[in-house]
Each structure stands twice: as C-alpha cells, then as structure tokens.
Image: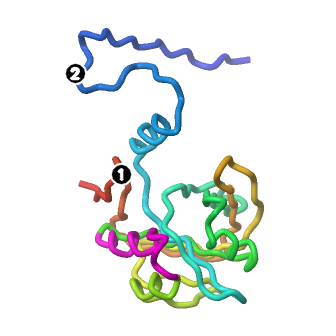
Amino acid sequence: MTSAPSYPLIHVAEAERPANAPPLTQRTTDRTCREVFAQLPAAVSVITTDGAHGPAGMTASAVCSLSVDPPLILVCIANRSRTLEYILSHGTFAVNVLREDQADVARAFADPGTGQHNRFAAAPSRRESGALLLEESAAWLACDVQDTYPGGDHTIVTGRIRSLGASRIRPLLWHGRRFRALS
C-alpha cells in the first residue's frame, strides 16, 4: 500500500506578509466567505432553459465539469432563482460560456430587475438539440437534468450532456467582483 505524499506546511511570518493582507485566520461569516469566494476566478456562463413556462436564463459562475463517462456537468443555482424553477419544470438546460467581450450579456442575465424577455434581447439565441443557446458563446452544452442536491442556499444541478460545441474564443472571467479577460 502506498501512502499519500505529505506536503510541508508553509508558515509565513507576520513581518513577511504585505501590510494590506488579511489576517491568516478569520471567523467564518457571510462577509468573510464572500471575500474569500471573490478570489476564486471562474468562467462566466449564462444558464438557459425553455419550455412550457417560456424561456428563462441567468448568469452563473458556479459551473464545472463533472464527468466524461457519462458526460456530466454541474451547475449551482440559488434556491430563490426563477430560472431554477423553470429548469426543474422543463427538465433541460444549456450552459453558454460567455466570450471575453460579453460582459454586457452577463450583466443583463444577472440583473434581477431585467425581465426574461429583455435578458434574451441582450444576445441572439437559437434552438439546437432541444436547448436554447446563445448565438455567440465561446462554448455551449445542451443538457438534461440528471440529479439535484441541496447545497445550502443553492441547489446543485447535474446535467447529462446531450450535445456541445466550442470555439477558440477566450472566455469571460469573474474575479474580485469584476469581469476580467485572460491576459
């Protein structure tokens, strides 16, 4: 039996830390979680669905690949989201990975004051493989809802990928509460 490699802990002396660095340990609060989560860079996607209730969409950064065999993706959606309600009702959704020049599209789909019709006015869309896809995305995945799991104030939705496509266009990123591009 092989043992897991051990890695040395690195201790940084207070004198070596930048003056504006946060404390090494903090009590976990909503605020500290948000501050730390803001440092996790993520691609920006728009999650879309369409069905009996009509089209719905929202901006998301909590999206990741889950499995190649079978092909699965994971999306985390706020429990209060109407888009979540529509996805669960329709049983399908698409993940549209935005291009680095689509921050305006991300904002339109993120703004709770923007109605669904106006959100879709921000980016042309098409239906393909039974999914509502944003025309000019860097990549897209059309999915059937596989499973859902509770995740605190979010629901974890896994999707079985039916079809997908990608371009070589660079994605839009979210980091430090700002949209960014790869350099």
Question: Splitting the image into 4 quarters, where does residue 85 fall?
Answer: bottom right
In the rendered view of the protein, which quadrant contains the C terminus?
Answer: bottom left
Foreground residue, 159 or 4?
Answer: 159
- Please name whichever residue, 142 or 48, is drawn nearer the observer in this view of the structure: 48
Q: Looking at the image, is 123 positioned above or below residue 166?
A: below
Q: Is residue 169 left or right of residue 50?
A: left
Task: Tell me if mark 2 has few (under 14), some (14-19) or many (20+) residues whose alpha carbon lies within 10 angstroms of its own.
Answer: few
Q: Name, please, the residue furthest toward the front.
A: 113
Instruction: Identify residue type, mark 2.
Output: Ala
Residue 109 belongs to magenta span: yes
Where residue 76 appears, as percent x and y from the top left, is 61, 57
Which tag, 1 or 2, sits closer to the chain's start? 2
Cα distance in 3D space between marks 1 and 2 = 22 Å
Identify the residue at image location x=50%, y=16%: 7
Q: Residue at x 56, y 55 (%)?
A: 64
* Magenta highlight range: 101-115
What mark, if any, has residue 177 been given in the picture? 1
Relative to 89, 39 lies left or right: left
Residue under label 2: 19
Check disc 1 and give the amino acid type: Arg
Q: Residue at x 73, y 80 (%)?
A: 90
Whether 119 is drawn above or below 43: the answer is below
Please give the count of numbered marks on the rendered protein. Answer: 2
